[in-house]
Amino acid sequence: MRSTADRIRQALSFELIGVLIVTPLFAWVFDHPMGEMGALAVLGATVATLWNYLFNLGFDHVLARLRGDTRKTMPLRFLHAVLFEATLLVLLLPLFAWWLGVSLAAALVMEVSFAAFYMGYAFVFTWGYDTLFPLPRTARV
């Protein structure tokens, strides 16, 4: 299993790279000022960073208990990304509506767009992270 320091590095690098990509993209797509969308992205990233740590820790514990191994197959990577984004959507929906001054329905459209982006991004990022920083041999069982 990954160490706390490794999990923190993973979560922070995931969120920093994500904010740098998503802020200009979604400011343009949703026609909101860059500063407003950037602040929302940072606020959302802060919530997501905390959730990322807790979710990944729990997911790995479940994998270790059920399989005796924390390595992820492609189907498990897909499940991981979908579950993470679905739970994060529930956490962030009220924040999006309040921050942007839009209805929950409009916020849901935005949040689903963010979730779709981050789901693909999470899949690619965690695969790349696991390739760059593989689990130590002793952490696999």
Image (cartoon, grey):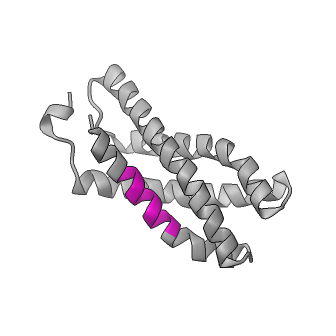
Q: Nearer the viewer, residue 130 or 47?
A: 47
Is 13 colored magenta in this rendering?
yes
Q: Residue 78's spot in the image, x, y percent?
A: 46, 45
Is 107 left or right of 134, judged from the image as shown? right
Q: Residue furthest top?
A: 65
Q: State whether residue 1 is above or below residue 103.
A: above
Task: Indicate whether residue 129 is drawn in magenta.
Answer: no
Residue 8 on image: x %, y %: 36, 47
Determine if residue 124 is in view: no
**In which quadrant of the rendered image does the N terminus lie?**
top left
Residue that protrudes farthest toward the left in the picture: 137
Q: Is residue 38 above or below residue 97?
A: below
Give the position of the C terminus as an image quadrant.
top left
Out of 90 and 69, give the one closest to the viewer: 90
Of all residues, the one furthest to the right in this rendering is 103
Q: Which residue is at a point 49% across and 71% down the rendered structure image? A: 20
Region in magenta: 10-19
Quarter assignment of residue 97: bottom right
Residue at x-position 31% and y-position 25%:
64
Q: Is residue 5 visible from the viewing direction of this image?
A: yes
In this picture, residue 63 sits left or right of residue 133: right
Q: How many marks?
A: 0
Q: Is residue 30 left or right of residue 122?
A: right
Residue 26 versus residue 59 in the image, above or below:
below
For the stretch drawn in magenta, the main secondary structure is helix
Position of residue 113 measured from the top left corner of the image (x, y, whole percent): 66, 60
Residue at left offset 57%, top offset 47%: 85
Residue drawn where x is 60% and y is 55% of the image? 44
